Amino acid sequence: MQEKRLQKFKRVARYSQKTITVILENIYDTHNVGAVMRTCDSIGIRQIYLVNTENSGINELVTLGKRSSMGTRKWIDVSYFRHWDDCIKKVREMHQYIIGTYLGENTQSMYSCDFTQNVAIMLGNEKDGLSTEAISHCDQLLYIPQAGMAESLNVSVAAAAILYEAYRQRMLKGYYSDKPELSNAESEALLQTFIDRSEDKISDPRQYKIRPK
């Protein structure tokens, strides 16, 4: 492996985030899943959750449309669920709070949310947003402030807006500099995972750790 690439792997492993993730519910467009995954990768998220309770266009294979998104798939683990209870049980093992996106009463601006806590951000599908069942699992609901005529954003755009607010908050806390979330041992283990996957002969990144439930 070239030294430049190895140093990049070390940097990415060092500043990966273990206390923030994304849950996507019944997404229909695989391009949106790919776009969300690219944003997750860009801020250091290494694990996301897909919930499909309505036979949407997403299945265990997570077939992504763009080559760039397929490349990202190699560096992010995806857990796939058909039932909310199974997903929430798994998420709660790793994350303390679940914040859902919802445009309605009793919601807070995303700028009022603390994304430096141990949090899972939940986003709904392109047509209906989060379901009533999904909302019932949330500890908090947020909206993205807007000044235009449209009432909502594309799910991948919404995810990018929220995740980069999370990035800003976490950067100010030092999570990407002098106070990384991963211990030295965790960082080394993740680095080895990156190296192993980069050298893997598997040509289809959909095969990485997809766990239907």
Image (tube, grey):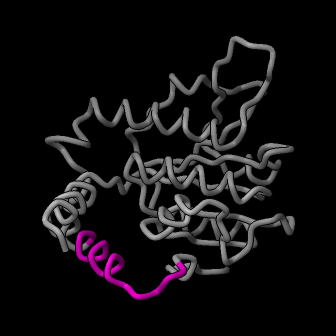
Q: Residue at x 59, y 42 (%)?
A: 99
Image check: 184 left or right of 5? left
The percent coordinates of residue 176 (x first, y second) are 25, 42
Answer above or below: position of 98 versus 73.
Answer: above
Image check: 155 left or right of 163? right
Q: Which residues are magenta?
A: 190-204
Q: Which residue is more in the foreground, 47 or 29?
A: 29
Q: Which residue is more in the foreground, 96 or 102?
A: 102
Quadrant position of residue 178:
top left
The percent coordinates of residue 4 (x first, y second) are 17, 60
**Outermost residue to the top:** 147
Q: Residue at x 68, y 77 (%)?
A: 60
Image check: 186 left or right of 3? right
Image check: 61 left or right of 175? right
Answer above or below: position of 17 versus 199.
Answer: above
Answer above or below: position of 154 versus 97.
Answer: above
Q: Residue at x 67, y 77 (%)?
A: 61
Q: Is residue 24 magenta?
A: no
Quadrant position of residue 191:
bottom left
Q: Main secondary structure of the magenta part?
A: helix
Q: Which residue is more in the foreground, 125 or 6?
A: 6
